[in-house]
Amino acid sequence: MALDPELIAIAQALPPTDLRDPVALRASATELLSRLPRSPTTGVLIEDIRLEADNELPALRLRAYSPESASAQSPAVLWLHSGGFVAGSIEAEDSLCIDMARAVGARVFSVDYRLAPEHPFPAALNDAERALRWLRDTAARLGINPRRIAVAGQSAGGALAASLVLRTVHQGEPDIVFQLLITPVLDDRLETHSMRTFIDTPLWNRPAAELSWRYYLGAERGDVSPYAAPARAHRLAGLPPTYIGTSDQDPVRDEGILYALRLAEAGVSVELHHFPGTFHGSNVLAPDAAVSKRQQAELHAALRRALTRVP
């Protein structure tokens, strides 16, 4: 398999992803992403929101991206950023969220969840769940329709999105209308063909995946919850309609494809898009490549369809 010609130069220029020092990784990831062009904010209002500490949960920061044309009953997207559970930030995915809010016509809320290894599972998931509950509880004040909330994320954010949807539905609260999972990290067992094959691919590879799961699972390693690794879930019936996007030369490619197949077998409406010639995160690192533009256009279209389907 060959990389898309527009992606070769950036793939070759990427430094190896080394998770042995999470603090250093965060700094290098921030520096790398700072070199990317930021989307213009024209037509999108941006606001930082702070949820104060509550019982055992620490303070939580969100960033809201609202189209200036949004109505009083706007749909909303809860976005969970990438970063292998150990890195990433709201700021790093500003452009993704700005473009999403503008293209979809929805208010987007990005969650600054806690990172491993300092905060292993279920800290990040608890933060995501708190953000979702806050969206529902304050929907009227925020100007959103609580029946038109989608959950979305990329990479580790895709894992958290899938986990949040699973736990929410299993708790008897099936009011998430859609989940959008981009190159999601779903399976800690690391047994798929793509995970065994792609040991040195750009940005993400098997050694990085091994450390990422070790940091995230912490003491859970012996008995892994499906709310940590959604591929372990047995009950998939009743989940909301789903869009899954996978990349060609990506260790997590097959777990995304297999999850889509299992959702379909469980009766869930699922749309799977596989993008040849791409690598993990290439849509973020090479946003001007034709294949990246196609990826973004398709996920925006999937969100628009899902969020206008429910009154």
Image (tube, helix red, strand yellow):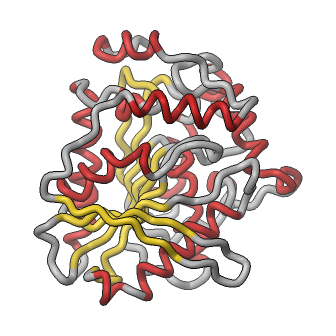
Image position, residue 249 (x, y; %):
48, 23
Q: In this view, does 234 lie to the left or right of 83?
A: right
Image position, residue 226 (x, y; %):
69, 60
Q: Residue at x 35, y 85 (%)?
A: 139
- Where is 304 relative to 134, above or below? above
Q: Residue at x 67, y 30 (%)?
A: 208
State the residue in front, 209 or 215.
215
- Where is 182 relative to 164, above or below? above
Q: In which quarter of the image is the N terminus?
A: top left
Number of marks present in the image shown:
0
Q: In this view, does 76 lie to the left or right of 228?
A: left
Q: In this view, does 260 lie to the left or right of 288?
A: right
Image position, residue 288 (x, y; %):
23, 27
Q: Which residue is drawn at 71% across and 44% down?
A: 188
Image position, residue 36 (x, y; %):
34, 30
- Where is 310 relative to 249, above or below? below
Q: In which quarter of the image is the C terminus?
A: bottom left
Q: Residue at x 59, y 62 (%)?
A: 163
- Where is 275 relative to 239, above or below? above
State the residue in front, 125 or 228.
125
